[in-house]
Image: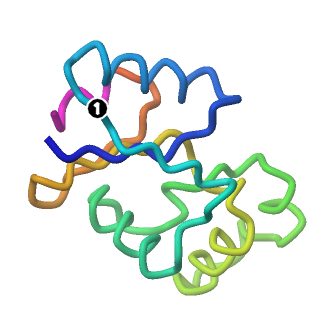
Amino acid sequence: MTIKIYHNPRCSKSRQTLALLEENGASPEVVLYLENPPSKTALKGLVKSLGIDSARDMMRTREAPYIELDLENVDAETALIDAIAENPTLLERPIVVNEEKAAPNAKIGRPPEQVLEIL
């Protein structure tokens, strides 16, 4: 099973999701997205993998950059992707992708048990 988790070790939900994956026999590739932000292409792929309509659906809307950049009033998808690429703290966490399945093949681990649907 090829599983990838976009992980922030300081986040309790992210830690819980990683533990849940491991308890269910997965050995996920851990992407520390704050240290190695995903490219714009990877972010567009995450939108598709999650089966969502907009990058906004995978954004942390209470983070300072979201408010400071007035992203609530931005409709252009490319601008939202650019904002996440430049401010990876905006990416919701954790996101788990099962690369062996067809899209939608990803889930946001809030709550962590949601990721079990794609294993």
- Per the image, label 1 sits on a secondary structure element best described as loop
**Callout 1 amino acid:** Ser
* Residue 20 percent across, percent down from the top left: 35, 17
* Residue 43 percent across, percent down from the top left: 46, 70
- Residue in the picture at 62% in, 38% down: 8
Q: Answer with left or right where residue 6 lies relative to residue 75.
A: left
- Residue in the picture at 68% in, 61% down: 88
Residue 88 or 59: which is nearer the viewer? Answer: 88
Query: Is 16 above or below relative to 18?
Result: above
Segment colored magenta: 114-119
Query: Is 16 above or below relative to 35?
Result: above
Residue 116 lies in the magenta-colored region: yes
Residue 85 or 47: which is nearer the viewer? Answer: 85
* Residue 6 percent across, percent down from the top left: 48, 47
Q: Quadrant of residue 90?
A: bottom right
Q: Answer with left or right where residue 17 lies relative to residue 14.
A: left
Location of mark 1 (residue):
27
Which image quadrant: the N terminus? top left
Q: Answer with left or right where residue 36 lies relative to residue 17.
A: right
Give the dominant element type of the magenta stretch: helix, strand or loop.
helix
* Residue 83 percent across, percent down from the top left: 69, 74
- Residue in the picture at 23% in, 28% down: 26
Which image quadrant: the C terminus? top left
